[in-house]
Amino acid sequence: MPERLEILKTAKLYIAGKFVRTESGRYYHPKNSKDVSLGNICLASRKDFRNAVVAARKAQAAWSNRSAYNIGQILYRMAENLEARKAEFVNILSKEDSLTSQKALSHVEQCIDRIVYFAGWSDKFQQLYSSVNPTASSHFNFSIVEPTGVVAAICGKKSGFSGLVSAISAVICGGNTLVLLAEKNAPLSAVAFAEVLHHSDVPAGVVNILTGEEEELSSHYSAHMDVNALLTIGLAKEKVTPMKELAAENVKRFIQWEISELQPTIFEKPLNIRSFLEVKTTWHPIEQIGGAQAAY
């Protein structure tokens, strides 16, 4: 009997809540460290990225207006669905990163716990980062934090599944939307996690996941005028510098995560939500009435 050929998955992009093929019709065929093919993976183009940014911008206002409690519910639902598919993700990471089953299980469980962590912060960070500020005049002065808007993220080599989950959780917890480029040689976990998002009540366009060449898309991620913040995860310094310069030309917020920051004790902190928030300050005049102060 002839040897059976394995049917390799054709991994699609996840844009605007739909699984779509790249408009360019291009694919690549990555292999793991044991020379095992990971499938037929879409090679996203500039047009795919632009489509994803349009979807993210369209979804951002409605997502940021959701209650913090509801955002926490959706994040927790993501954790529930990842827990239910834990065995599948262990198999994916074992194949993708050539990990032992035990180590892959540890990675997946760490990611589940990380999503729950950010779900818990969804209705608390506003109190932590907002303030009533002292003034020298007859005014109240309040500062609150608001979402930055559309965030673009690039997962570099070795950022892995942990980097992807960390970026998605921190960014959308603060009311932002995201266009993420998965690590080129770890696309299967990214595509599978898009399926988790799809079944977790995450509105279309809130998270968009692309696969492809970092070298081809990094300049577009940095220079796009409708992207408000750029996050790099585990990229080498020589790659980060030109991206930072392009981002500065359109006053884009730039955030860089080193690989060490993906570890639980360092990464799991509300400051990673704060990185994607802007401060809005309001002055409110006070009228003096008979020696007492009254706001109006």
Image (spheres, rainbow, N blue to C red):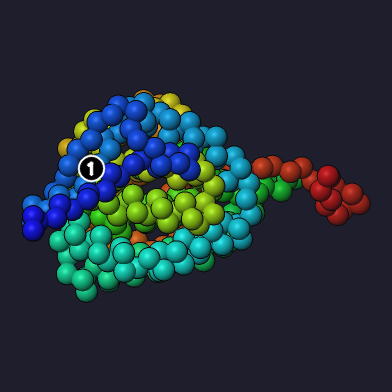
Q: Is residue 32 visible?
A: no
Whole-percent x, y for residue 218 in the image: 28, 33
> Considering the numbered disc 1 on the image, is that residue within a helix, a strand or a loop?
strand
Would residue 60 appear left or right of 250 to someone viewing this image? Answer: right
- Residue 95, quarter of the rendered image: bottom left
- Viewer-closest of 116 and 245: 116
Residue 155 in percent (x, y) is at 28, 46
Check the image and report above or below for 93 versus 100: above
* Residue in the foreground of this view, choosing between 81 and 176: 81
Question: In the image, is 220 to the left or to the right of 141?
Answer: left
Q: Which residue is mark 1?
A: 40
Instruction: Count the marks.
Output: 1
At horizontal 86% and vertical 54% (from top left) the residue drawn is 292
Which residue is at 28% across, 44% downward? 10
Q: Quadrant of the C terminus?
A: top right
Which amino acid type is marked by label 1?
Answer: Asn
- Splitting the image into 4 quarters, where does residue 89 fall? bottom left
Task: Where is residue 230? Give x, y as percent.
Answer: 37, 39
Q: Is residue 74 above or below residue 179?
A: below
* Residue drawn 45% across the image and 64% down it: 81
Q: Mark 1 packing: few (<14 Cα in 10 Å), some, or many (20+)?
A: some
Residue 32 percent coordinates (x, y): 13, 53
- Farthest residue in the bottom direction? 102
View extreme (front): residue = 1
Measuring 40% from the left and 50% from the top, which residue is drawn there? 194
- Residue situated in front as seen by the camera: 229 or 204: 204
Judge from the rendering whether residue 245 lies leftward or rightward of residue 236; answer left or right: right
Quadrant holding the N terminus:
bottom left
Residue furthest toward the right?
Answer: 290
Eyeballing the image, is 229 above or below 32? above
Q: Viewed as shown, does residue 123 lie left or right of 25?
A: right
**Is residue 11 shown to the viewer in this render?**
yes
